[in-house]
Amino acid sequence: MNKLGFLIVSILIIISDQISKFYFTNKNVIITKFLSFRYAENTGAAFSILQNQRLFLILISIIVFFVFLYYFKKTDKLVLTGISFLFGGIVGNLIDRLYFGYVRDFIDFKIWPVFNVADSFNTLGVILIVYYLIYLEKN
């Protein structure tokens, strides 16, 4: 992945995150017994920890991203894809924190806390980077 690909992937994640959050704001849609779209406002981080710590969470988001950029100056496609996922996810949730003071969540699997598109890409980005560190970096 080159710089243009990184930028395109990140922007598509940010746009899809913001559009989906806008669409599901104040909507509750039951799809199946196990999945629904239920609007929720989260003033904390994952699993609603650190509630009402907006400034701290904004700073942590920015710091974490720059630590990843600094540490992973490699051009490995898997790492760059993971970082682009993280960048898109971090910015998607950062927009919410800055504009609303909370993150809008809406995906509810009933057995897991409610989350959003940005959270999904943050998770995928971390998985890709961890996979690289454990299985590929040694080669």
Image: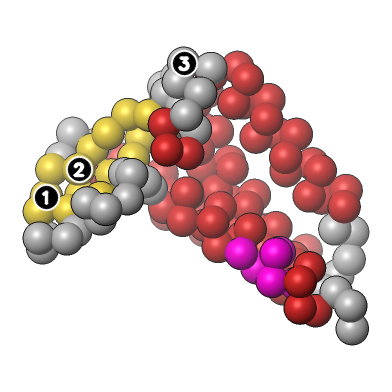
Give percent across and percent down for residue 37.
Answer: 20, 49
Left or right of 91, for residue 17: left
Label ID, residue 38: 2
Residue 86, placed above or below residue 58: below
Q: Identify the residue under disc 1.
A: 29
The residue closer to the viewer here, 108 or 86, is 108
Q: What element does badge 2 sit on?
A: strand
Residue reaching furthest to the bottom:
139
Residue at the image position 10 percent from the left and 63 percent from the top: 32
Disc nearest the viewer among 3 and 1: 3
Q: Which residues are magenta?
A: 127-132
Give percent across and percent down for residue 112.
Answer: 32, 50
Q: CA distance from mark 1 to mark 2?
A: 6 Å
- The amino acid beneath tag 1 is Val
Quadrant of the snapshot with the N terminus: bottom right
What color scheme is it?
secondary structure
Q: Quarter-wise, where is residue 105 in the image?
A: top left
- The amino acid beneath tag 2 is Arg
Label ID, residue 105: none
Q: Identify the residue under disc 3.
A: 52
Left or right of 64, for residue 99: left
Give percent across and percent down for residue 33.
Answer: 10, 60
Q: Main secondary structure of the magenta part?
A: helix
Residue at the image position 65 percent from the left and 34 percent from the top: 61
Q: CA distance from mark 3 to mark 1?
A: 27 Å
- State if disc 2 and disc 1 touch (CB < 8 Å): yes
- The amino acid beneath tag 3 is Asn
